[in-house]
Image (cartoon, helix red, strand yellow):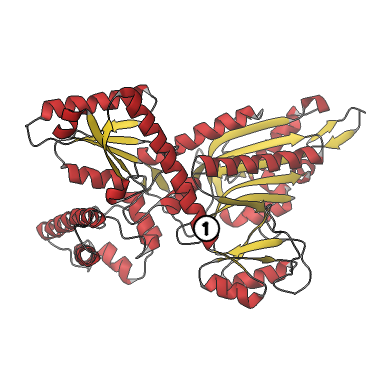
Amino acid sequence: AADVETAAPAVLAAATDAATAQGLVVRDIKEKKKNGEATKDDVDAAVALLVALKAAVAALENGGAAQGAAQGAKPDDAKGDKKGADVGVTPKSEDFGRWYLDVIRECELADYGPARGTMVIRPYGYALWEAIQRWMDLRFKESGVENAYFPQLIPYSFIAKEQSHVEGFAPELAIVTQGGGKVLEEPLVVRPTSETIVNHMFSQWIQSYRDLPLLMNQWANVHRWEMRTRPFIRTLEFLWQEGHTAHATPDEAEAKAIEMVHVYAEFAATMAAMPVVVGRKSRVETFAGAKTTYTIEAMMGDKKALQAGTSHNLGDNFAKAFDTTFLDENGKKQYVHQSSWGVSTRLIGGIIMTHGDDTGLRLPPALAPVQVVVVPIAQKNKDKETVSLAAAHIVETLKQAGVRVKLDDDTRNSPGWKFNHWEMKGVPIRIEVGPKDVATGACVVARRDKPGKDGKEFGVSVDAVVLVAKIKQTLDEVQASLLHEATVFRDDNIVDVNSYDELKTAIADGKWARGGWEGTDAQELEIKEATGATIRCFPFDQPLGDKTCLMTGVAAKEVCIFAKSY
C-alpha cells in the first residue's frame, strides 16, 4: 500500500463532513415520509446521494481501505478504525449484512477489537447483556443452580480425554505453549467450553449419592478460533454462561437438559420477544461429546436460522473419560450422568436481526437499557424553563415507578435530530413535551414499533398515576407487538415439503423447509452440500398425522426443519 496516493486531509475531511451531513438528511427525510411529508422517491434520491458520498470517502481514504475493497475484503475483516468511512444505516431491505454492521456501529453496541476476530462490547451493548444476565441468573438460582468459576486455561490432555470432543473442537482451539519466557511442559488450551475441567473437579468433589445432584453455572468468556467472524454472532472471544450438572440417573440428566432448554425458550419469548422453535438436534449437529443436544432456533429478518441457545444431555461420556463416579445407596460404584447448557452474547445479535428495521434497532421493552426517552421542545430560550421543569417532572415520575427513563435536554441537537437518534437506538417509547403540552398538563407519547402518526398519542396526562399507568401499558403493548410481528413473519416463512425437490425450492426461496425425515447422516450432509441448509432441529411440537420422509419416501416418525443458518 506504500504506492497508494493519500488524499489531502482537508479534502478527506470535507468529503467526510458531507457524508455525515447527508446521513442526517436521510434520517430527516425518512421521518417526513412516515408523516406523509415526503415520498419514497425522495428517500431513494437521498439514499443514493449518501451512497455516492460514502464511496467518495472510501476512495479518498488511506490506501488500506480502498485496496482491501479492490481485493474483495469482507465487512467482518474490517478493523473499524477509519472514522467517517461509514455514515448512517444502510436500509435493511437493500443489504441485510451491511445493515446489521451499520446498526451495531451507529447504535454504539460494539466495535472491532485490535486483534482480528475480536469485539469490544460498548456500554449500550453491554447493558443488553447485563439485562440478559439478570433474568437468566435469577431463573437458574430458582432451579437450585449455584454460580462458580473455573480456570480459563485448561491442560490440553483434558481436551484429549474425550475423543469426539477433541475432534469437534480441534480446529477452533487457541493453545498456549509458552509462559514466563519458557516453553510449557504441557500446552494449555484457552477455554473453548468447560466440560473437561468441570469434570476434573467434579471427580474430586463427588464421592457419594449424597453429593448429588451437583448443579453449577459460570458466567465467563470463551475463545474459539473462528475463520469468518461477525459481531455478536461469531467472534474469536465471546461472553456466555455455561451450566454444568451431575446426577445419579440418566432420567435426571435428561430432565435437566429439557428443563433448561425450556428456560431459554421462556426467555426468548417473554424477554427478547423472539419466537423460537424448540427441538432436538440431529446426530450430525449434536454437540461434540454429547448424547443429545436440544436447541432453540430463531428466524432472523433475512430468514436465516440462528441457534440461540443449546442444552446437552452428556450421558456418562465425560464421566467415563474423567472417572467421575459415586457410590450409590447400595455402595456400588456408578458413573454420574450430566447435562450442560449455555447461551451467549449471540442473543444480542439475534435481537438486532429479529426486530430491527430500516431505521435501526427496535428493542423489546423488557430488555431495553432505556425504555423511555423524554425530549423537551422549546423555541430557543422562550418557554425553556417551564418546558424543562415539566420534562424533569415526567422523568422523575417514571423513575419512581421503576421505568428506565432518560432525559435528552442536550441543546446542541434539534428535537428532530433527537427523534431520529433515539429511534435508531431502538428506545421503545419517546415522550415529547412542549409549551402547549405544559399549558394543558399533557405530553405526546410516540411508540418505536409504530412509525409516524400511527404510533403517536397526543394529550396524554402527566398526572403521575395516569402517566405511569399509560407508559407501563404501552411498554407491554410494544413488547407484545414485537413478539406477534416476529411470530407472524416466522410462521409465514416455514414451508411444509414432501420431497427433496420441494425442499430445494423452499431453500432457494429463502424459506425454512419442514418435512418428515428418516434419512441417513450422509444424506443430511448431501443436502447441506447441495443447498447450504442443515437440519436445525426436530421440533418438540410435532404435527399430527402420518409423516413421510422427504428424502426416501418411507414412513417417518417425526418432521424436522431444514434452513440456512448463521
Residue 503 position, x and y percent, is 61, 72
- Horizontally, is 442 left or right of 238 in the view? left
Number of disc labels: 1
Q: For the residue marked with disc 1, what is the amino acid? A: Arg
- Horizontally, is 538 left or right of 19 in the view? right
In terms of image quadrants, where is residue 100?
A: bottom left
Pick the front one: 503 or 37: 37
Residue 241 position, x and y percent, is 56, 38
SS at badge 1: helix
Pick the front one: 464 or 175: 464
Pick the front one: 195 or 470: 470
Residue 553 seen? yes
Residue 447 vs 217, above or below: the answer is below
Q: Which residue is mark 1?
A: 490
Pick the front one: 354 or 522: 354
**Residue at 75% over, 42% down:** 254
In terms of image quadrants, where is residue 157?
A: top right
